Amino acid sequence: MEILQLKYFCDAVQTQNFSKTAKKFLVPPSNISQTIKRLEKELETPLFERHINKIKVNDAGLYFYKNAKTALDLLEDAEKSLKELHEIKTVKINIHICRRIVMEAIEDFRKFYHEVSFITTHNNHQISDEFDIIVTDKELNLPYLKAKIAEENFLLAYNKNKFDLNNYANPLELKNLPFVTMNSGSSMYENTLKICNRQGITPHIVLQSEDPFYIRKCVELGLGIAIVPELSWRGQFSEEIALKNIGEIKRKIYVYQKHSINKYIDEFSAMLIEKFSL
């Protein structure tokens, strides 16, 4: 049984005329008649009463028509949904880390696809499959395509005019240094605690913010020191800021991509991965 057979049959039921159906599908009337006969043979029952120059659907035909029409409608809806999914021009991204790099990738992407819009969030706690792409350092239990794209070190950032730390191989050994960091639950906050704990100290956090820009601004102003990611914050500080290695703790950077036929999601994900490799 073929879809075209069902289309011919359903239209013939509606028109009660093989010639009208043939005209609609731009085929000879004999094609419609032969196709219906093959369908009847396959179903082992006649579907129409045939008279000279006239046809009429019978009870078996009406019963089959209701189910065949439902099946065709479902197939049409599925095809329409598939096309709509392919043409969706909005990409939803949850950015846990590396905001600057992701935003630069969005800027570059829209130069080629100006019709695409992006919705971004920065909620580390919101782990769900509502996002098309997630950029994180966490291992997520989601049915996504997963790519480990980079690793980055952490550096100690401080205003060298406010803090005289150049002569210390490990400034973290100094007590009561004021720290600025991002809010609890963020990768930067968790890694700040982890790095300090390895040194046997509890960081004296004097300021927290959810915006990386204000963390950098506080460091620039000398309000405190910060443990910052090397790759994603590269080039974000002025010459007044010293960046010092503080060990081998690294974080892995992952891009999780939802399984989708949407070309924009695929192509943006590829561009983002390439961006991290530069």
Image: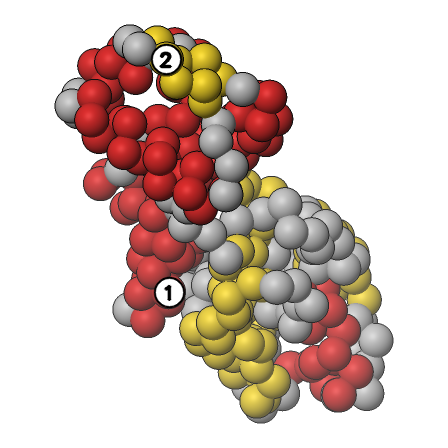
Numbered tag placed on residue 273 in the rendering: 1
Dot 2 amino acid type: His
Q: Looking at the image, is 84 positioned above or below residue 245?
A: above
Numbered tag placed on residue 14 in the rendering: none
Whether residue 202 appears in this view of the structure is yes
Give SS at disc 2: strand
**Residue at x-position 32% and y-position 57%:** 271
Tally the numbered discs. 2
278 vs 91, nearest the viewer: 91
Give SS at disc 1: helix
Task: Place residue 163 in its image quadrant.
Answer: bottom right
Quarter of the image containing the C terminus? Answer: bottom left
Question: Dot 1, how many residues are within 10 Å of its Cα: few (below 14), some (14-19), or many (20+)?
Answer: some
Q: Is residue 267 left or right of residue 103?
A: left
User: What colouring method underlies this structural image?
Assistant: secondary structure
Separation (CA) of disc 1 from disc 2: 68 Å
159 vs 192, nearest the viewer: 192
Q: Earlier in the sequence, mark 1 or mark 2?
A: 2
Question: Dot 2, how many residues are within 10 Å of its Cα: few (below 14), some (14-19), or many (20+)?
Answer: few
Dot 1 amino acid type: Ile
Which residue is disc 2 drawn over? 51
Q: Indicate the position of residue 150 as horizontal and vertical percent values.
A: 44, 75
238 vs 34, nearest the viewer: 34
